[in-house]
Amino acid sequence: MERLAIDGLTWQAEGESSLQFWGEVINLEQTTHRWVRITIRLLDAARNVLAEKSDITGLEWTLPSGKNPFFVRFENPPRDWHSYDVTVASHVHDYADAGVPQPHAGLQVDRVHYREINRAGLYASLIGLLNNTSDTPASHVKVAATLYGPDGRVVGVLSPYMVPQGVLAPGDSMHFELKFYALSGPVADYTVQAQGRKVAT
């Protein structure tokens, strides 16, 4: 049985126009999962489903004992929602299948610095350096940041593509900045991860 747990879940309503959920998937198995999908359902007091939204985790692969952040947003959620439930679905990754993308092992981030900003709707940013330390190029490169509150719960997630139309060549580096326009509370800590795909040679 798959053992993918949800941790650090928080939510925040912005008036009646949106409802946002942040959290992490923890892989308790010794197998890698690909494209983990989170589904959140809003329920009424009798546990009838009023609305449902799904999204994938910030990174393509969730490694053994690894954490992978997610963010799910409802636009115009039902006013009478009372509670919610969360389900997780995924595919076990096959490292021997040449027909599916394989994770790149040489991507690293360093020189990461967190800055509080709190102006013009921008709460904070993370800047750093992304490196390809291997001898093979990487495509579909993403950097995923998870922000944590004082209680260890997730208060912000961002996971943009860094080189969406190209590759990060062997030995290359690039600076990045992640800008957070939505948070569910004060930030006490953070993690930053990078993933990409091996480019067939």
Image: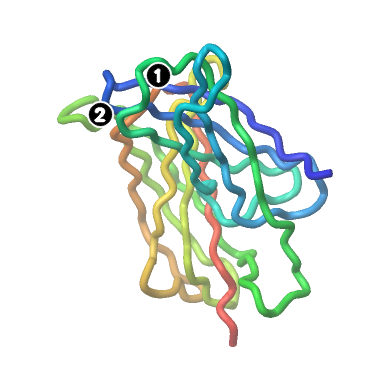
Q: In the rendered view, does 91 fall on the left or right side of 127?
A: right
Q: Quadrant of the N terminus?
A: top right
Label 1 Cα neighbours within 10 Å, binned few <14 / some 14-19 / many ≥20: some
Q: Secondary structure at mark 2?
A: strand
Relative image position of residue 60 (x, y in whole percent): 57, 56
The extreme left residue here reads 120
How far is the residue under mark 1 from the one under mark 2?
14 Å
- Looking at the rendered structure, the kind of residue marked 2 is Ile
Q: In the rendered view, does 190 fall on the left or right side of 91?
A: left
Q: Quadrant of the C terminus?
A: bottom right
23 or 127, which lies in front? 23
Label 2 Cα neighbours within 10 Å, binned few <14 / some 14-19 / many ≥20: few
Q: Secondary structure at mark 1?
A: loop
Relative image position of residue 47 (x, y in whole percent): 57, 19
Relative image position of residue 66 (x, y in whole percent): 68, 44
Q: Which residue is mark 1?
A: 185
Q: How many marks?
A: 2
* Residue at image coords 29%, 22%: 14
* Residue at image coords 49%, 45%: 55
Q: Which residue is mark 2?
A: 117
78 or 55, which lies in front? 78
Q: In the rendered view, does 97 fall on the left or right side of 58?
A: right
Label at residue 171:
none
5 or 41, which lies in front? 41
Give the answer, above or below, for where 46 lies relative to 39.
Answer: above
Relative image position of residue 97 (x, y in whole percent): 74, 75
* Residue at image coords 58%, 35%: 24
Give the answer, above or below, for where 117 lies relative to 68.
Answer: above
* Residue at image coords 56%, 69%: 197
Labels 1 and 2: the sequence-earlier one? 2
Q: In the rendered view, does 164 fall on the left or right side of 149?
A: left
Q: Are marks 1 and 2 in contact (CB under 8 Å)?
A: no
